[in-house]
Image (cartoon, rainbow, N blue to C red):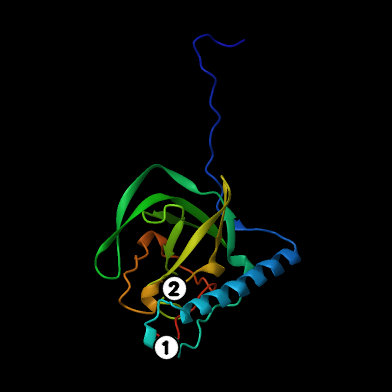
Amino acid sequence: MVASGCARREAAHAPAPPAAPETVQPQTIAMWRSQFDQQKAQWNALFLGDDSPLPEARRASFPGQGFYPFAPEWRFVGDLARNRQVTGIEVPDTKGREQVYWDYGRFPLRVGDRVDTLRVYRPSEHPEQYFIAFTDSTTGGETYGGGRYAHLDSLDIHRFVLDFNQAYNPYCAYDTLWACPLPPRANALPYAVRAGMTKPPGHP
């Protein structure tokens, strides 16, 4: 018997579990590694071409950008917690100015026993992107001091991939004429993310 005047009870919505590496077959990891090698080659071709972030005078002598070895354990799959209200925010950049981004959501991930939550932006000029600027304990040593960038890739509405093997340096790491957004404090990871690009060649 249902009491009159009562609406159906809504199901409780538990927060999504933190993103974690997937358990996959060895052939899948081999495919990811092959894709990673192709992306490295594409990046280094970019550095030598007309759209390079390097000053033109440095392109011919550029020895190539270094990367950590491919590490499947730094590829995370999980849900994106979208903000109920998406607002535009002003993000400080390397020129002391501000750039407009949409503060879109949060992406929790588990590394060991820790769960950290990364802020996810969508650039106003590229609203199709899920953009993450982050630092970690390699920042300023093995990797660029201004942090690195990564993107979420959508598998479906509730499954996203954050692959730190694709983490890359901002263009201002190669030429100070570029203005690049700074990572928020919330995206300072306390451990070493040894995946993706390392420090640019010749960078202090």
Kindly identify the amino acid type of the residue bearing the numbered disc 1: Gly
Q: In this view, does 202 lie above or below 153?
A: below
Quadrant housing the C terminus: bottom left
Q: Residue at x 45, y 89 (%)?
A: 60
Kindly identify the amino acid type of the residue bearing the numbered disc 2: Asn
Q: On the image, numbered disc 2 is attached to which residue?
A: 169
Q: Is mark 2 on a helix, strand or loop?
A: loop
Could you say which is closer to the camera, residue 140 or residue 27?
Answer: 27
Q: Assess disc 2: are there few (<14), some (14-19) or many (≥20) residues with their C-alpha within 10 Å of its C-alpha.
A: many
Residue 83 in percent (x, y) is at 42, 44
Left or right for 135, reference 159: left
Q: In this view, does 78 lie above or below 31?
A: above
Marks 2/1 in contact by CB < 8 Å: the verdict is no
Which numbered circle lies on residue 177? none
Residue 127 in percent (x, y) is at 42, 52
Marks 2 and 1, how far apart at CA? 14 Å
Q: What element carries label 1?
A: loop
* Disc on the earlier residue, 2 or 1: 2
Q: Residue at x 31, y 78 (%)?
A: 176
Q: Is residue 131 above or below residue 194?
A: above
Q: On the image, numbered disc 1 is attached to which residue?
A: 202
Residue 82 in percent (x, y) is at 46, 45
Q: Assess disc 1: are there few (<14), some (14-19) or many (≥20) residues with their C-alpha within 10 Å of its C-alpha.
A: few
Q: Is residue 41 above or below residue 73?
A: below
